[in-house]
Image: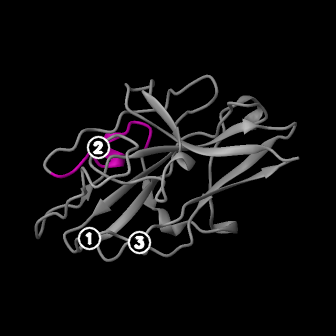
Amino acid sequence: MVATVSIRYDFGGADAAPGSSVDVDSYGPPCIKFKLADNATIDGNNKLEIPGLGLGPYYSCWKHMYLYCDNPDGHTISDVKFYTDGTNSYGTGIDVKVGLQFPTKNSGSTAGYEVAHAAVGGTSAELVVGHGGITTSATVFDYTVGAGALAITISEAGSVINAAGETANYVLLQASVADSASAGTKTNETYTFSYTEA
């Protein structure tokens, strides 16, 4: 047998104390939606806005994603990675940023969680400016399978996941929209977590 895992994200509540945690498999596709609201609802509300000429970029509320162990079945998970196919299919002027730090999330702590700031004038706070745990970010499409994947830290005991309810640290994602973007529904993208199991 193999370990059973899920991809989850936290939202709402207060700093260090998220109000809700959801398994992305309970939605979609799409499983997550970048929007101007800090919730898990997949709908047409709270749409991202295109800034006026010379303004922006505008940002979505950020997402606190993580790998969650539902059942280790006697196995140990390590070497957690995160990646994309390397191609941005959203179109000109639209990007998704990933934080290059991984705030603390584990079976005993959500200390790295910070509530996504409310939308102001068509934009939420930019990740590096608004989230105290993130000091640098990059386009998520820079990270691809294999050697190009982003290595995610684990803050469980021994830096491994080997019990139900244990997790990798948070991966922070945020969409950005420049004034060159076009309106309309965009193509879904796939974001992938991988890991080593022993």
Residue 109 lies in what quarter of the image?
A: top right
The numbered mark, 3 or 2, whose residue comes first in the sequence reads 2
Q: Are marks 1 and 3 in contact (CB under 8 Å)?
A: no
Towards the viewer: 22 or 108: 22
Towards the viewer: 186 or 77: 186
Residue that label 2 marks: 37
Q: Residue at x 48, y 55 (%)?
A: 28
Mark 2 Cα shell of 10 Å, populated few (<14), some (14-19), many (≥20): many
Residue that label 3 marks: 187
Mark 3 Cα shell of 10 Å, populated few (<14), some (14-19), many (≥20): few
Mark 1 Cα shell of 10 Å, populated few (<14), some (14-19), many (≥20): few
Residue that label 1 marks: 184
**Amino acid at pointer 2:** Ala
**Amino acid at pointer 1:** Gly
Q: Is 146 left or right of 198, judged from the image as shown? A: left
What kind of element bears circle 2? loop
Disc ID at residue 70: none
> Which region of the structure is painted magenta?
122-134
Q: Residue at x 41, y 58 (%)?
A: 97
Q: Is 97 left or right of 78, judged from the image as shown? A: left
The numbered mark, 1 or 2, whose residue comes first in the sequence reads 2
Q: Is 168 left or right of 33, judged from the image as shown? A: right
- Measure how far apart labels 1 and 3 are at the Cα level: 10 Å
Towards the viewer: 132 or 33: 33
What kind of element bears circle 1? loop
Predominant SS along the magenta part: loop
